[in-house]
């Protein structure tokens, strides 16, 4: 009797092994688990203005071209042709381009999408970018000063898209990779106004490597391979599970326990250790700059020697070390990563303007301050340094406050304001020295230098130099050597006039577990999983 | 009785309307708007956006438009999740938040009250000291510290629970503990001190002297009165717990409405601010009414007609 019972018991123990192969069936689908960080405000390419939306759009949609690490590859457009005078760009749309619902994608879809994005009635936060596209009539229409019908884009037939530019523009084609210029299907958009269609799996029709199959507000979304994508044969991942966990430490713990394969937001406190010991950690330059604005309308900043002294007296290398995110000390305003007409890096070629990455400039700074009439800072008024509330900004502000006190003998108070309040204060010019930050929206140094043109909406220091304006205008109308010569000259002027103190250039940090391969990103910072695969 | 309820109902409605009004004008008085985003939008585009959402109408018109919508339970579109209505946001998030809140309330009532009573009955014995020690910890340690430590050790190091979300039944443990931590401890202490107070009363001595069984003295006579302060505290607390905690939901990545309370303010998402505030106000007012009814049940000395507070 006991033996029989024992045998039954043992055979019962073997039962679970019958189901052991169950797991393997699920693994026949290639899955990527990705934490996006935040629930995007919108993923409608025409309405989006944020980086989280950009990451999704870059995988769900595709524009005329795709930009990967600076290289432009054909997207929905299989080829393009620029006229001799540079003012007409003709794109040939692939005949096999389709939407995720199986319908044909044509040049008319681009015309619709672009005009819709430009139209002020649509309320796109990003329509201001049309000013930099140089497309005829676009800027006027976006600002409500001209009819949308007058925009210089047309589709003479289903597979040809013709764009008319005001001036030849070198970076125009690469700009077409940006989410704002991705096509959207008219019937989808009209079915779910204000971008609601993009977040609804029933209505979302897209043209990229992946399509949306589920969206749960505040929780996450799912992307699945789009079988109608023209390059679907090369898309290896079947499902991307995207989560919206914005508490970086929680996401990091989840990554460590294998719940995530990819994070695009890493807790800053972990960064130094990750840089030192973790091959899964990646740092990429983000084409932007962290700086301080002088309020150029104030008397106290009138002497350029004072401004230059303050810019020289800070040790940028030390600041970057403390921030420990792989940031690059800045000298000029344009970060590394822009290539000029001769293939040289703009940042490397532009020179250092007599600035140093470390504290070598302190002696000169002291001299300048004395020359300006404030030896050892005596008599220089106390001022307030304003920044928006954040631990990181506080850290940098405290460091520069200390550096100025020690090196120049000048004192300042630190004040922080909540982001929206701060933006108001800063744009109204209600400050003495205020923190600023800018990231380019297109692959050209103009994306950074243009903000200092007189009257530009983002010209916070209220800087105005007609020579600078003229050079930026020239750069806007030219290409090649003339274009870059004008930009180099413009930065020269900017660094001579110093309406801002540049501090460092930004970086993007990612964690990617070893099984994830062949992922890439655009230089403007959007992740690209179109040719990625996961090898567990 | 009916008059009482009608009166209370009308007062409650007026209270909610008042709260909505004050919130509306207060939030419009802080600088910034829904479109002051990471990249400030050029003035012309800002104008177009404000026109589209009627944010450039005179404030009083916006107020009446909003209140009109509110009476038809239409809380408008969210400004920070464009294309999604506030109704949808709340419909999606509230059940999740409320369920976690409900579990927390259950825990507080099932654990906090009995533990407080036992502590009072065994005053100054080891069990009392232990309970008071734990309760003090619970009241003083901030919820985000509890939550983060929990995730780091129980989920990360020991791998006993999922590190985020509410996918499995065990994943509820962390959020419920973190959410209830403070109130659980507070209720335990409150029940204990209230019980101790009641046990000192003359009528308890009388009941005992009359030969009533101890269980009857405690269970029937002492407890009812001891619970009055607890019920008073629990009313608003339940309202707060059922509408979620920003900290707990953020750290455990729970897709509820708790986070909207804080996020909507920094985003200047006017409609979401109003939506969650009105929801919380309605809940709160309802709980206060329930508590008042409960008083009459617990303490026969309290009658509706004598409602003079």
Image (spheres, coloured by chain):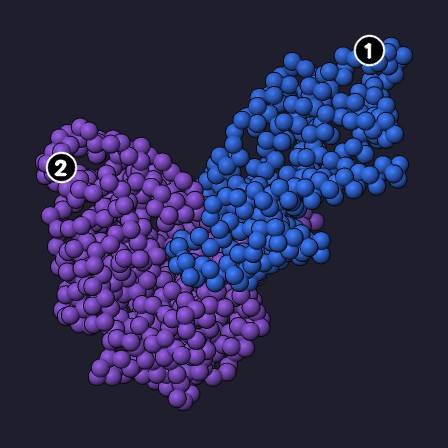
Q: Can residue A175 be seen in this view?
A: yes
Image coordinates for residue A430, horizontal then vertical, percent: 36, 43
Q: Viewed as shown, does residue A399 lie left or right of A496? A: right
Q: Can residue B75 be seen in this view?
A: no
Vertical side of A320 occupied by A140: above or below: below
Colour used to depict chain B in the structure image:
blue
Q: Residue at x 15, y 60 (%)?
A: A489
Are labels 2 and 1 on one chain? no
**Residue denoted by label 1:** B202
Q: Could you give the CA–CA distance between mark 2 and mark 1, rounded to whole angstroms?
A: 85 Å
Q: Mark 2 lies on which chain?
A: A
Q: Which of A361 and B174 is in front in this view?
A: A361
Image coordinates for residue A493, horizontal then vertical, percent: 16, 55
Q: Identify the secondary structure beneath mark 2.
A: loop
> Which numbered disc covers residue A140?
none
* Crowd band around label 2 with a 10 angstrom C-alpha radius: few (<14), some (14–19), many (20+): some
Residue B304 sits in quarter: top right
Colour used to depict chain A in the structure image:
purple
Q: Which chain carries label 1?
A: B
Vertical side of A207 occupied by B171: above or below: above
Q: Which residue is drawn at 54% across and 46% down?
A: B28
Name the quadrant of the N terminus of chain B. top right
* Crowd band around label 1 with a 10 angstrom C-alpha radius: few (<14), some (14–19), many (20+): few
> Which numbered disc covers residue A372?
2
Name the quadrant of the C terminus of chain B. top right
Image coordinates for residue B276, horizontal then vertical, percent: 61, 47
Q: Which residue is drawn at 32% across and 80% down?
A: A164
Vertical side of B126 occupied by B26: above or below: below
């Amino acid at each position: 009797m006991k033996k029989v019972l024992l045998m039954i018991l043992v055979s019962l123990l073997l039962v679970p092994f019958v189901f052991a192969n169950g797991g393997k069936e699920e693994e026949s689908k290639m899955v990527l688990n990705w934490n996006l960080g935040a629930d995007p405000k919108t993923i409608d390419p025409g309405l989006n203005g944020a980086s989280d939306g950009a990451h999704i759009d870059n995988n769900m949609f595709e524009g005329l071209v795709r930009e990967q690490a600076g290289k432009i590859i054909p997207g929905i457009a299989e080829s393009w042709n620029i006229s001799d005078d540079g003012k007409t760009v003709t794109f040939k749309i692939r005949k096999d381009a389709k939407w995720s619902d199986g319908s044909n994608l044509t040049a008319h879809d681009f015309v619709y999408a672009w005009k819709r994005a430009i139209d002020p009635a649509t309320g796109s936060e990003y329509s201001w970018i049309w000013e930099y596209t140089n497309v005829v009539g676009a800027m006027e229409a976006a600002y409500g000063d001209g009819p949308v019908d007058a925009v210089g884009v047309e589709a003479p037939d289903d597979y040809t898209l013709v764009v008319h530019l005001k001036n030849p523009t070198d970076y125009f084609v690469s700009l077409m990779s940006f989410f704002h210029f991705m096509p959207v299907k008219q019937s989808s958009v009209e079915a779910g106004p204000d971008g609601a269609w993009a977040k609804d799996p029933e209505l979302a029709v897209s043209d990229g490597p992946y399509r949306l199959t589920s969206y749960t507000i505040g929780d996450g979304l799912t992307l699945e391979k789009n079988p109608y994508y023209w390059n679907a044969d090369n898309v290896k991942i079947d499902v991307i599970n995207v989560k919206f966990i914005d508490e970086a430490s929680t996401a990091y713990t989840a990554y460590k326990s294998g719940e995530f394969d990819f994070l695009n937001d890493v807790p800053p406190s972990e960064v130094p250790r990750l840089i030192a010991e973790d091959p899964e950690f990646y740092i990429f330059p983000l084409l932007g700059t962290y700086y301080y604005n002088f309020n150029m309308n104030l008397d106290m900043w009138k002497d350029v020697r004072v401004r230059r002294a303050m810019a020289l007296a800070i040790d940028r290398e030390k600041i970057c070390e403390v921030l420990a995110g792989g940031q690059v000390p800045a000298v000029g305003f344009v970060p590394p990563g822009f290539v000029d007409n001769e293939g040289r890096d703009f940042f490397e070629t532009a020179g250092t303007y007599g600035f140093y990455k470390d504290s070598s400039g302190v002696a000169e700074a002291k001299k300048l301050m004395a020359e300006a009439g404030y030896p050892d800072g005596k008599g220089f008024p106390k001022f307030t340094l304003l920044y928006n509330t954040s631990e990181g900004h506080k850290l940098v502000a405290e460091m520069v406050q200390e550096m100025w006190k020690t090196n120049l003998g000048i004192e300042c108070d630190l004040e922080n304001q909540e982001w929206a309040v701060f933006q108001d204060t800063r744009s109204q010019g209600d400050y003495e020295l205020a923190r600023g930050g800018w990231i380019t929206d297109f692959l050209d140094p103009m994306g950074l230098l243009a903000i200092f043109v007189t009257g530009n909406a983002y010209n916070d220091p209220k800087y105005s130099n007609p020579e600078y304006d003229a050079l930026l205008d020239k750069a806007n109308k030219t290409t090649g050597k003339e274009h870059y010569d004008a930009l180099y000259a413009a930065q020269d002027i900017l660094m001579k006039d110093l309406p801002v103190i540049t501090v460092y250039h930004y970086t993007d940090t990612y964690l990617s577990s070893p099984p994830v391969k062949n992922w890439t990103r655009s230089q403007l910072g959007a992740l690209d999983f179109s040719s990625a695969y996961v090898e567990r | 009785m009916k008059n009482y309820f009608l009166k209370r109902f009308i007062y409650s409605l007026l209270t909610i309307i008042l709260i909505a009004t004050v919130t509306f004008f207060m939030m419009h008085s802080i600088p910034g708007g829904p479109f002051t985003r990471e990249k400030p939008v050029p003035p012309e585009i800002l104008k177009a956006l404000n026109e589209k959402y009627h944010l450039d109408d005179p404030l009083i018109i916006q107020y009446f438009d909003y209140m009109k919508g509110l009476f038809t339970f239409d809380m408008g579109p969210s400004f920070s999740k464009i294309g999604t209505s506030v109704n949808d946001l709340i419909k999606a998030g509230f059940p999740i938040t409320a369920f976690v809140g409900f579990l927390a309330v259950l825990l507080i009532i099932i654990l906090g009250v009995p533990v407080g009573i036992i502590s009072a009955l065994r005053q100054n014995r080891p069990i009392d000291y232990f309970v008071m020690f734990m309760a003090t910890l619970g009241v003083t340690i901030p919820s985000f510290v509890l939550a983060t430590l929990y995730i780091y050790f129980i989920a990360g190091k020991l791998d006993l629970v999922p590190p985020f979300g509410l996918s499995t039944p065990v994943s509820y443990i962390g959020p419920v503990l973190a959410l209830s931590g403070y109130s659980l401890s507070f209720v335990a202490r409150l029940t204990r001190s209230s019980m101790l107070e009641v046990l000192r009363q003359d009528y308890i001595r009388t009941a005992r002297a009359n030969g009533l069984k101890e269980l009857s003295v405690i269970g029937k006579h002492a407890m009812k009165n001891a619970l009055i302060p607890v019920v008073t505290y629990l009313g608003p607390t339940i309202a707060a717990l059922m509408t979620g905690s920003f900290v707990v939901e953020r750290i455990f990545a729970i897709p509820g409405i708790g986070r909207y309370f804080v996020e909507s303010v920094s985003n200047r998402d006017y409609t979401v601010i109003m939506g969650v505030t009105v929801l919380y106000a309605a809940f709160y007012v309802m709980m206060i009414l329930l508590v008042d009814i409960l008083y009459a049940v617990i303490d026969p000395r309290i009658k509706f007609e004598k409602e003079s507070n």
